[in-house]
Image (cartoon, rainbow, N blue to C red):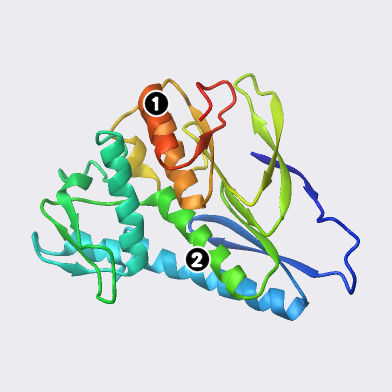
Amino acid sequence: MLSADSVPSPAGLQGPAPARLRRLRVALGTWVAIEATADSDAIAAGAIEAAFAAVSEVERCMHPEREGSDIARIHSAPPRVQTPIHASTWEVLSLAQRLSGLTAGVFDPCLPQRPGRLKDLELSGAPAGSAPWAVRRAPLMLDLGGIAKGYAIDCAIAALRAGACQAGAVNAGGDLRLFGGRRETLLLRHRDRSYQPLVLQDAALAVSDLDEPRRPPGHRGYYVRTGAAGAGRRWAAVLAPDAMTADALTKCVLLCSAACAGRTVAALGGRDITPGGGAQQ
């Protein structure tokens, strides 16, 4: 996915032009770019800092190996003992379990080093004033990878909105989400290495490439158990209302049969836009 150009918002509004700031930092095992449009540089800068803090919080909770993270504590907890987890971790694991059910277990972020699979993880009910928890019924090792990255993008977008930004964008290693009328023209790659333009606005786009040599060390659980792509694809692009859903659905498009992927994408309100790759949803 390549960014071709940015399309400015319509002109003609009275008063001074809004301030637009962009910051680039390393996070989530990749480069994260956050852009904010607000009434002043100070407002935009403050919102960007809050957005990066939100990204760091997701990484702190969901890193698979960092001591004290929710995921590391689930790994080390005794079987059938409740492990308190953050509401954000519960939300990501809940979506993963839903996708696992929709794909008959093909979508599974558990690594093969341990025998447990996502079906061996029990979650509390939806958080409603009480701390959520997780219980593993078998030894397992989670690597939420891209789905956690997508969730971090969504949290960053929420921070920009809460910080009085009028528009913004968050881009993290192949996952991109825009809001507030922000538009960007992208180029989507075809199998023959040609490209087609795509205008993205108020939506999220995720791409996933099985042949990408620079893929972060995360994302392992989705691929290593299944080997090749189930639908014969090596690259996928999906649009969705939020980045967590878009990223998760790219794995379904790559690893599931075309029929299963189509049903799953439709169930979560996404759209498979992989050039030359099956039916559009």
Image marks 1 and 2: residues in contact by CB distance under 8 Å: no
Relative to residue 273, is residue 3 drawn left or right?
Answer: right
- Residue 29 pos. (x, y %): 49, 55
Q: Residue at x 65, y 33 (%)?
A: 188
Task: Name the quadrant containing residue 157.
Answer: bottom right
Q: Residue at x 45, y 47 (%)?
A: 245
Viewer-closest of 248 and 111:
248
- Residue 19 pos. (x, y %): 80, 71
Q: Of the residues under marks 1 and 2, which one precedes in the sequence?
A: 2
- Residue 274 pos. (x, y %): 55, 29
Name the amino acid type tagged 2.
Val
Disc 2: CA contacts within 10 A as few (<14), some (14-19) or many (>=20): many
Q: Is mark 1 on a helix, strand or loop?
A: loop
Which quadrant does the N terminus fall into?
A: top right
Question: Which residue, given by chain and number where applicable, does mark 1 sit on?
Answer: 229
Relative to residue 41, is residue 14 drawn left or right?
Answer: right
Q: Is mark 2 on a helix, strand or loop?
A: helix
Disc 1: CA contacts within 10 A as few (<14), some (14-19) or many (>=20): some
Name the amino acid type tagged 1.
Ala
Q: In this view, does 173 lie above or below 35?
A: above
Relative to residue 126, is residue 8 drawn left or right?
Answer: right
Question: Which residue, given by chain and number where applicable, does mark 2 sit on?
Answer: 55
Q: Which residue is drawn at 49% across and 40% down?
A: 270
Q: Which residue is drawn at 39% across and 68% down?
A: 60
- Residue 138 pos. (x, y %): 11, 51
The CA distance from mark 1 to mark 2 is 30 Å
